[in-house]
Image: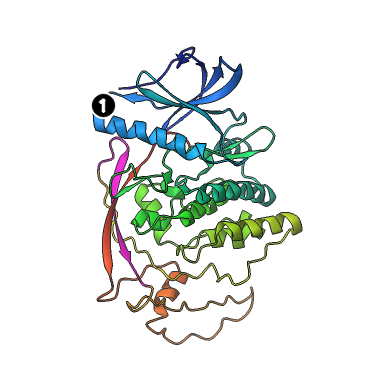
Amino acid sequence: MVTEGETGRVIAGRYRLQDRLGRGGMGVVWRATDQLLGRQVAVKELPSDDSLSAAQARRRRDRTLREARALAQLHHPNVIVVHDVVEHDERPYIVMELVDGGSLADRVAGRGPVDAREAARIGVALLGALRTAHAAGVLHRDVKPSNVLVAEDGRVVLTDFGVAHVAGTSTLTESGTLVGSPEYTAPERMSGVRTGPESDLWSLGALLCAVLSGESPFHRDSLGGILHAVVSEEIRPPAQAGPLLPVIRGLLERDPDRRLDAAQAEEMLRAYLETGRTFPPAGTADPRRTTRTVLLAALLAAATAGAGISAAALITDRDGGGDGTPASPAPRTTPPPGAPSPPASPPPSPSSEPSANRSAGRSSAPEPGAPVSTVTVTVSQGAGPS
């Protein structure tokens, strides 16, 4: 049975819980009063769960403490501030600044999608927060609208580092376990191939789509559909993206090596805010081209009870002929509306065929002898808005 603190309860002899502000898969957040300093704070509580084993309960406690440590080393106006970490009745609590105004998800749900200029402002703020986190060796791993707060004065605040990874520490998730929200999770994280700052930037690209249109471009009715959309379907940024399309395409590049980095994306968004136009950074490859095909060969529904669903993902490296040299992607040209169709192209060469298939949003079967690996991941889906 899951239990959580009651209104009016005093934690660690100092913090009086008042109103529950929200709840997610990693804890409950309360409005509270710091009785020592006489100020309002937010207190994140890890609910106790009698169904957990001692080892599982310890991992949950360690995850909460890890979040506090990750946040404590970050100093940026767009990152939530941690004031204190306390334990009460063998349960950890994180005491943070109180940001009145609700989450970005709440704002979009209540007021509707934002325009391109507001999306760019939000993007610049979050890129600053992520650059600070990444410089400190912290990967957020769950960037999504419900983990972003918008203060009444418009300040954008990245919060909920509950599944963050801190450089130099061991991961608290078991091998093969995918943490985060699938609609905002980068394809390389789903495959288990690689995790780095680039994965947070993919999540930001999906977030920008969501605030512009009202939902993630990878929203589907099932987990299998989401995974298929992320790893293999043609990515269709919302029409509302308009002038931000080059940034969103660059952030949603499936090959992390070709994805826009934080500095490039911030430069482009700032250029738009200043001039009304976006300019691709010098030397940046066309973000619509990809050198890696990630094939989703099977999605096996497993235990749907509780919070986990298992899926098998087939990962095929199609970068080249095995010598590490990427195959050259075939260029695409789109005729203007009303123009006659160009003559049919000759059959593609073996090196260009994968890129042509990618351009059409289709998956290719692996060639004989191509390196193939199967990775099983378990996606944990917590409560709360995405």
**Element at label 1:** loop
Which quadrant of the view contains residue 370? bottom left
**From which residue to which does the magenta span run?**
303-318
Residue 311 belongs to the span the image colors magenta:
yes
Report whether residue 216 is seen.
no
**Quarter of the figure that contains the N terminus:** top left
Closer to the camera, 2 or 99?
99
Report whether residue 6 is seen.
yes
* Relative to 40, residue 299 above or below: below
| 300 on left or right of 90 | left
Q: Residue at image x 58%, y 50%? A: 127
| Mark 1 crowd level (few <14, some 14–19, many ≥20, 10 Å Cα) | few
Q: Residue furthest right?
A: 275
Which quadrant of the view contains residue 265? bottom right
Closer to the camera, 48 or 235?
48
Q: Residue at image x 44%, y 75%? A: 356
Where does label 1 land, which residue? 51
